[in-house]
Image (cartoon, rainbow, N blue to C red):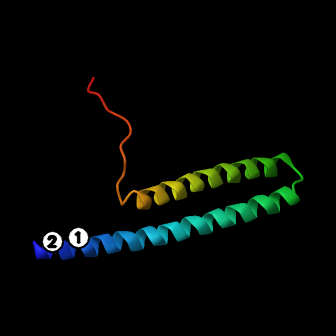
Amino acid sequence: MKRFDSFEKIASLIVDIMLGVLVVVVLIAMGTAIYDIFTHVLEMSSMNELYYVIEEIATWFILLEIFLMLLRYVKEGHHVPVRYRFYNI
Protein backbone atom coordinates (compact mmCIF):
# COMPACT_ATOMS: atom_id res chain seq x y z
CA MET A 1 0.00 0.00 0.00
CA LYS A 2 2.92 2.32 0.67
CA ARG A 3 4.11 2.00 -2.93
CA PHE A 4 0.68 2.97 -4.19
CA ASP A 5 0.63 6.08 -1.98
CA SER A 6 4.02 7.21 -3.27
CA PHE A 7 2.95 6.50 -6.87
CA GLU A 8 -0.24 8.50 -6.28
CA LYS A 9 1.77 11.46 -4.95
CA ILE A 10 4.15 11.35 -7.92
CA ALA A 11 1.26 11.13 -10.40
CA SER A 12 -0.52 14.03 -8.66
CA LEU A 13 2.67 16.12 -8.80
CA ILE A 14 3.09 15.40 -12.51
CA VAL A 15 -0.54 16.35 -13.18
CA ASP A 16 -0.11 19.60 -11.21
CA ILE A 17 3.04 20.51 -13.14
CA MET A 18 1.39 19.78 -16.49
CA LEU A 19 -1.67 21.83 -15.51
CA GLY A 20 0.58 24.72 -14.53
CA VAL A 21 2.36 24.57 -17.89
CA LEU A 22 -0.98 24.39 -19.69
CA VAL A 23 -2.32 27.41 -17.80
CA VAL A 24 0.80 29.42 -18.71
CA VAL A 25 0.48 28.43 -22.39
CA VAL A 26 -3.20 29.41 -22.45
CA LEU A 27 -2.46 32.76 -20.79
CA ILE A 28 0.29 33.50 -23.30
CA ALA A 29 -2.05 32.62 -26.17
CA MET A 30 -4.73 34.88 -24.68
CA GLY A 31 -2.24 37.74 -24.37
CA THR A 32 -1.12 37.42 -27.98
CA ALA A 33 -4.76 37.23 -29.11
CA ILE A 34 -5.55 40.47 -27.25
CA TYR A 35 -2.51 42.14 -28.79
CA ASP A 36 -3.55 40.99 -32.28
CA ILE A 37 -7.09 42.25 -31.75
CA PHE A 38 -5.96 45.72 -30.70
CA THR A 39 -3.37 46.07 -33.44
CA HIS A 40 -5.86 45.05 -36.13
CA VAL A 41 -8.65 47.28 -34.77
CA LEU A 42 -6.38 50.32 -34.80
CA GLU A 43 -5.24 49.69 -38.39
CA MET A 44 -8.53 48.39 -39.80
CA SER A 45 -9.02 49.38 -43.43
CA SER A 46 -10.95 46.53 -45.04
CA MET A 47 -13.60 43.91 -44.36
CA ASN A 48 -10.98 41.15 -44.44
CA GLU A 49 -9.39 42.65 -41.33
CA LEU A 50 -12.81 42.79 -39.67
CA TYR A 51 -13.24 39.07 -40.29
CA TYR A 52 -9.82 38.46 -38.78
CA VAL A 53 -10.73 40.49 -35.68
CA ILE A 54 -13.98 38.53 -35.25
CA GLU A 55 -12.03 35.28 -35.58
CA GLU A 56 -9.52 36.43 -32.97
CA ILE A 57 -12.29 37.45 -30.55
CA ALA A 58 -13.93 34.02 -30.93
CA THR A 59 -10.56 32.36 -30.33
CA TRP A 60 -10.02 34.48 -27.24
CA PHE A 61 -13.35 33.42 -25.75
CA ILE A 62 -12.54 29.75 -26.42
CA LEU A 63 -9.19 30.20 -24.65
CA LEU A 64 -10.97 31.96 -21.77
CA GLU A 65 -13.33 29.00 -21.40
CA ILE A 66 -10.38 26.57 -21.37
CA PHE A 67 -8.65 28.68 -18.72
CA LEU A 68 -11.78 28.78 -16.55
CA MET A 69 -12.27 25.02 -16.92
CA LEU A 70 -8.69 24.41 -15.78
CA LEU A 71 -9.15 26.67 -12.77
CA ARG A 72 -12.37 24.90 -11.82
CA TYR A 73 -10.68 21.52 -12.22
CA VAL A 74 -7.93 22.51 -9.79
CA LYS A 75 -10.38 24.23 -7.41
CA GLU A 76 -12.55 21.11 -7.14
CA GLY A 77 -9.58 18.93 -6.24
CA HIS A 78 -8.83 17.37 -9.64
CA HIS A 79 -12.39 16.19 -10.04
CA VAL A 80 -14.25 16.56 -13.32
CA PRO A 81 -17.94 16.98 -12.49
CA VAL A 82 -20.38 15.17 -14.73
CA ARG A 83 -23.48 17.31 -14.90
CA TYR A 84 -25.43 15.51 -17.58
CA ARG A 85 -26.95 12.07 -17.53
CA PHE A 86 -26.69 9.80 -20.49
CA TYR A 87 -29.63 7.53 -21.06
CA ASN A 88 -29.63 4.37 -23.09
CA ILE A 89 -31.99 4.67 -25.99
Q: Number of callouts in the render? A: 2
Label 2 sits on residue: 4
Q: Position of residue 33 (x, y in %)?
A: 68, 61
Residue 2 found in image quarter: bottom left
In the rendered view of the protein, which quadrant contains the N terminus? bottom left
Residue sitting at 36 percent across and 60 percent down? Answer: 77
Neighbour tally class for label 1: few under 14, some 14-19, many 20 plus, Cα within 10 Å:
few
47 to the left or right of 68? right
Is 49 located above or below residue 74 in the figure?
Answer: above
Check if mark 1's residue and mark 2's residue have beta carbons within 8 Å: yes
Neighbour tally class for label 2: few under 14, some 14-19, many 20 plus, Cα within 10 Å:
few
Amino acid type, label 1:
Glu
In the rendered view of the protein, which quadrant contains the C terminus? top left
Q: Nearer the viewer, residue 34 or 4?
A: 4
Q: Nearer the viewer, residue 57 or 69?
A: 69
Q: Secondary structure at mark 1?
A: helix
Residue sitting at 80 percent across and 48 percent down? Answer: 50
Q: Nearer the viewer, residue 14 or 53?
A: 14
Report the disc number at residue 64: none
Residue sitting at 49 percent across and 60 percent down? Answer: 71
69 to the left or right of 40? left
Label 1 sits on residue: 8
User: Extreme top residue here?
Assistant: 89
Residue sitting at 46 percent across and 56 percent down? Answer: 72
Q: Nearer the viewer, residue 38 or 6?
A: 6
Q: Position of residue 14 (x, y in %)?
A: 34, 73
Q: Position of residue 62 (x, y in %)?
A: 58, 51
Q: Position of residue 45 (x, y in %)?
A: 90, 53
